[in-house]
Amino acid sequence: MIELRIKQTVRDVTDFPKPGIIFKDITPILKDAGLCREITAALQEQVKEMKIDLIAGIESRGFLFGMSLANLMGIPFVPMRKSGKLPYKTVRQEYDLEYGSAALELHEDAIFAGQRVLIHDDLLATGGTVVAASKLIEKLGGEIAGYSFIIALDFLKGRERLKGFSAPVYSLASY
Ligand SMILES: O=P(O)(O)OC[C@H]1O[C@H](OP(=O)(O)OP(=O)(O)O)[C@H](O)[C@@H]1O
Ligand SMILES: Nc1ncnc2[nH]cnc12
């Protein structure tokens, strides 16, 4: 079962990047090409009945499987990046993290009004990042079709923060 494979492979790193945080390190997954293929296929299986025009992936770990998934589905991928990284005109949203604060940006021509967007990230924790990503998509007139994560830290209540966006939330492994 994919959830068990993911949990057996992810590495817990205590006190990173700050004391008290147990960091879910997905880099061991990336070394297992077979598991990466299975994860991408499982992510696709969860959303295959949905109408999705494009996938928006969140820097940096959301790029890894977000791009693979978009490629498998034959649809575009757009990167949502941390402050100051995108070269063209952007829309911007500040947010708080489990361990700090940051801002996300998106090229203003990345999404057209009415396009249905699947937001992908590796991990849902407090939901601060993905709420900021959702606001960026709505600023450009996009519709949020759903949310796709590999891991959800359910004890941090990120799903509850996403309720206001009325879109399904999928994950492959929950803690
Ligand atoms: O639900 P939240 O509490 O907002 O946390 C989840 C976010 O935190 C991590 O990213 P991070 O900001 O550490 O950046 P990285 O992907 O570049 O490592 C993770 O990849 C998510 O994007
Ligand atoms: N505990 C955690 N592990 C990995 N990424 C995270 N992003 C936010 N919290 C995290």
Image (spheres, grey):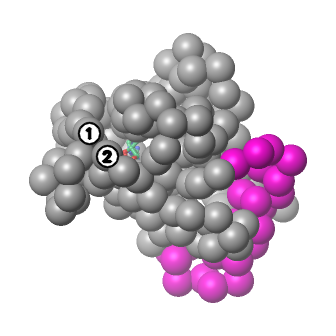
**Magenta region:** 28-52
Q: Give the percent coordinates (x, y) of residue 159.
A: 58, 25
Point out the image quarter for the C terminus. top right
Q: At x 26% / y 32%, what residue is drawn? A: 93
Does any portion of residue 13 appear in the rendered image? Answer: no
Q: Give the percent coordinates (x, y) of residue 98.
A: 31, 33
Disc on the earlier residue, 2 or 1: 1
Identify the amino acid type marked 1: Val
Q: Which mark is residue 150?
A: none
Magenta stretch prevailing secondary structure: helix
Identify the amino acid type marked 2: Glu
The residue tagged 2 is: 108
Tell me if residue 137 comes above or below residue 82 in the rendering.
above
Q: Secondary structure at mark 2?
A: loop
Q: Residues within 10 Å of mark 1 (few under 14, many from 20)?
A: some
Circles 2 and 1: CB atoms closer than 8 Å: yes
Tell me if residue 32 comes above or below residue 131 in the rendering.
below
Q: Which mark is residue 91?
A: 1
Q: At x 18% / y 62%, what residue is drawn? A: 87
Indicate left or right for 124 with 36 as reference.
Answer: left
Q: At x 26% / y 39%, what residue is drawn? A: 91
Q: Give the percent coordinates (x, y) of residue 30.
A: 52, 77
Q: Secondary structure at mark 1?
A: strand
